[in-house]
Amino acid sequence: MRFAARTFALAAAALTALTAGTAQAATDSDDFVRARVAQVAAYQTEPCDGAPTSADGQAASKLNGVLTQGLKNSMTAYRVSCARAVIDAVQKRGLDERAAVIAITTTIVESTIENISGAAGDGSSSIGLFQQIDAWGSRDDRLDPSWATNAFLDEMERVYPNGSWRTADIGDVCQKVQRSAYPDRYAKQTLDAQRIVDELSGPGAVTVSIYGALSDGRLTYSTINSQTGDRTKTVVSTDNLGFVPKTLATLNFNTLLVTSPAGQLYRVDIITNSNSLQFATPTALGGGWTHDMLTYDGHGHLYGIANGTLMSYVVSRPKPASTQIGQRAVIGTGFTMRTIAASGDDWLVGISTTGVLRSYHIAADYTWTGATLADRWSTFDQLVTPGYGLYYGQTRDGAMYRYFDHNPFDLNGSDIEGFGTDPVDTHGWTQILLSAQPLVG
């Protein structure tokens, strides 16, 4: 379903708040959501995906231990069942984790993730998880979580064509779809939305793709079954890059970024990695890239460390030219890391030079929050992750071990599960650089 611009202009003009009073008057995003949690208790709701299950209740308990924003201590089995319905609709549409975070962020602000069917005397036609008014569709459609989510995503893709929502600010995307009178409320709920999506979704049994570089400049490509931990393939290129790369970052299935020891940035286009690994002549993108390490988060953000300084860049194309990697921002100094990897949208995980496992979240204003997850990871020379809490550590003697962080966005390592007795391999990983393909669309 797609709507004409005029229809949406009329809809925007007709938008009203879910409630008046305290919730409407609250200007702080967290206060606003907390006030709505109290008020929507008096509203009628519809089931989202049948009756909530015991698993939904368990997930709610876990989330109440990690949520820090408007829904802090307010997740219920019912809210979890509604969040699951939204995430399922996003996944069935074939969109990635970022789309799910955008949708969940919106429902936190609009309905506190409840499928609201109305209340006596409300005077508003806004209903459902996204509080969609009459112009969006019939009452039954708007109360159908799958239909409502897809209608939201239709409009998101209309106002952000060609996948541009993937790199736009999440709060801005929510606002341009919803046209709220309070545009600042969305951005402040994105961290909890990310935590909810991470808890309720996951890769299942997927193929983890890892590119690598050998000391002679050749490239490698390996695949790992995320569920069993088995390495299912490794191919090595016949050709070499013409230099030994200093850094390696995987943008997507067939695009890599590498830097030379002289600080030249190159894009490497993979021709095939099925039964052999072949790549085109590297495309030079410019000099001055003297970073010690690079990593890409799958959401348009390239991170690098040079002499302990962490900085970020925006990558605006799947196969970027030199002009499509820019907006350099210095995040901070003192990042003395042995290895870093991107664990999610604006999230990093890495091992310090002292062997400490660290996690970092980079905010929209480039401030950061970090925490120690574990203090005995000195065995690993390299750490890679495709996201979804899957960590793979390469030891200096060539073994590859795997871990699962049940919530990679809680700045807490107590929920990291290790598989030390069942490693991916006990030897053979001789690459000097490794980089996992982000598990996003």
Image (tube, rainbow, N blue to C red):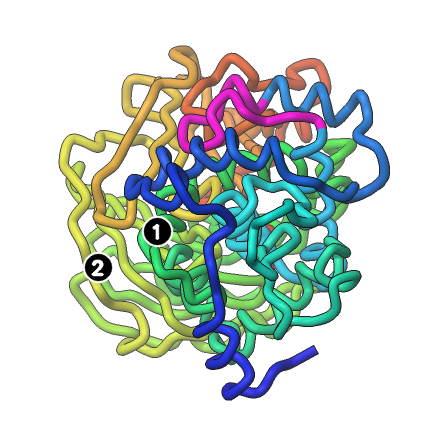
Q: CA distance from mark 1 to mark 2?
A: 10 Å
Which residue matches tag 2? 289
Quadrant showing the N terminus: bottom right
Which residue matches tag 1? 247
Q: Main secondary structure of the magenta part?
A: loop
Residue farthest toward the right in the current orientation of the protein:
50
Looking at the image, which residue is at 42% across and 54% down? 249
**226 w.r.t. 364: above or below:** above
Q: Is residue 202 visible?
A: no
Q: Give the amino acid at mark 1.
A: Thr
Looking at the image, which residue is at 76% across and 34% down? 227
Report the side of 199 relative to 172 (left or right): right
Crowdedness near tag 2: few (<14), some (14–19) or many (≥20) residues, C-alpha within 10 Å: many
> Which of 258 and 149 lies nearest the eye of the viewer?
149
Looking at the image, which residue is at 57% across and 73% down? 155
Report the side of 288 relative to 18 (left or right): left
Q: Is residue 113 visible?
A: yes
Q: Considering only order in the chain, which callout, 2 or 1, is on the residue closer to the N terminus?
A: 1
Measuring from the top left, give residue 334's x and y in whole percent.
16, 31
Residue stretch in magenta: 63-77
Crowdedness near tag 1: few (<14), some (14–19) or many (≥20) residues, C-alpha within 10 Å: many
Quadrant showing the C terminus: bottom right
